[in-house]
Amino acid sequence: MDCDVRDLGLAEKGRERIEWAAAEMRVLALIRERFEKERPLEGVRIGACLHVTTETANLVETLAAGGAEVALCASNPLSTQDDVAAALCEQAGVDVFAIRGEDNETYYRHINAVLDHRPHVTMDDGADLVSLLHRERPEQIGEVFGGTEETTTGVIRLRAMAADGALRYPIVSVNDADTKHLFDNRFGTGQSTVDAIMRATNLLFAGRTVVVCGFGMCGRGVASRARGLGARVVVTEVDPLPALEAAMEGYQVMPLREAARIGDVFVTVTGDTSVIRREHLEVMKDGAVLANAGHFDVEIDKRALEELSEGRRRRIREFVDEYRLPDGRRLNLLGEGRLVNLAAGEGHPAAVMDMSFANQALSVEWVVRTRGTLTPGVHPVPDDIDAEVARLKLRAMGIEIDALTPEQEDYLRSWEQGT
């Protein structure tokens, strides 16, 4: 295979971990079973820029079972699990270009290697592949049927491209499916972010003040899990509606300039840039912990940290960089400011990614089936796909639900009956 991975000798270890995750991904297994019979992706080349993890491996193997030829690169330099990359290349026949800790040059070389496979469908996690394709390789765009995007950050970028008239093919916003953002973003991000912070620091959350910057679905999850561990949770927001919701949920809501003075742990979950800035860093407590759960490493101003510490930085734990300020205060940045749940942890639990990746697989099938009929732009996941993922998840969990009676269906369709 055409691969660039750290060590193919890690393949067997990777295979064992892929199988462990598969046991929790029952919905994807049901889709894979159908794909193997129907082969709906026969002859389709897929270029994927995703986190190379055990859960992603199960998605990729499901697509391959449907007949697709898949080329995969990492969507984050610190999220790759090297043993998984080796297993996909050595045992699954997938072209993989991903090495944990790869530098910026290698990261973009790997994206170009995926595009060298001339994909018909793109799968993105942050929109780097789509952005590079439009910016540097526009001659290939005519070969692309469509794509999918997994993240809030990526959807923001794609909608900006569409608003500028720059997006030249249809992309499905998997991130906006109810079975994705209600579960992956809230339960997955909540658990995996707190888990990664605890792994990296071994700090006790109980009794500490945790500042969550952003109260979207991901922020809700982080706030809920931190409060469940006994933390005092402060929420900062720029949008009045989620700010009001946070207040009604019982969280303390205040501007970040005030929260910066009292927080022990800070988590950015916004999808925007320069959330924690110099003016916030200047007033933080000694020992404050800074973590980012947004896709790109731009939410915490790392340049300001370097300047304020005058270069006094040391790697005090595997995923903790301590910045010592001239007045003796220490500020601790986790995972180089990158997506902390994958930089310092294993990412979302497989049972949550099961639904997200089921949406991915079914959306790719839909893009292929409807090629030529969708206009360029960002499209929602069709409601029937969302409902099918929920139905399959309930089936996999052994849960049955009620069905409407004919009388109830008639009532919902009528308008004559009142008080």
Image (cartoon, rainbow, N blue to C red):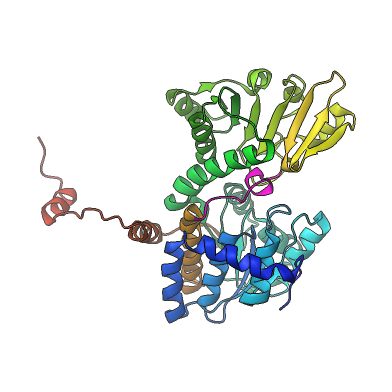
- Above or below: residue 280 compared with residue 371: above
Measuring from the top left, give residue 98's x and y in whole percent: 72, 63
Q: Is residue 27 left or right of residue 125?
A: left
Residue drawn 79% across and 57% down? 102
Prevailing secondary structure class for the magenta stretch in the rendered image? loop
Q: Quadrant of the N terminus?
A: bottom right
Can residue 71 be seen from the camera position used here?
A: no
- Above or below: residue 111 compared with residue 315: below
- Above or below: residue 130 compared with residue 45: above
Q: Is residue 46 left or right of residue 359?
A: right
Q: Is residue 82 left or right of residue 173?
A: right
Please tell me which residue lies in front, 28 or 140. 28
Which quadrant of the structure image shows residue 386? bottom left
Measuring from the top left, give residue 365's x and y in whole percent: 48, 70
Question: Is residue 346 inside the magenta stretch?
Answer: yes
Please tell me which residue lies in front, 7 or 76. 7
Can residue 324 be seen from the camera position used here?
A: yes
Please tell me which residue lies in front, 151 or 118. 151
Span colored in magenta:
338-350
Measuring from the top left, give residue 115's x and y in whole percent: 71, 69
Residue drawn 57% across and 44% down? 192
Residue drawn 73% across and 71% down? 8
Measuring from the top left, give residue 336's x and y in whole percent: 75, 42
- How many labels sit on residues? 0
Q: Quadrant of the C terminus?
A: top left
Question: Is residue 342 inside the magenta stretch?
Answer: yes
Please tell me which residue lies in front, 133 or 201. 201
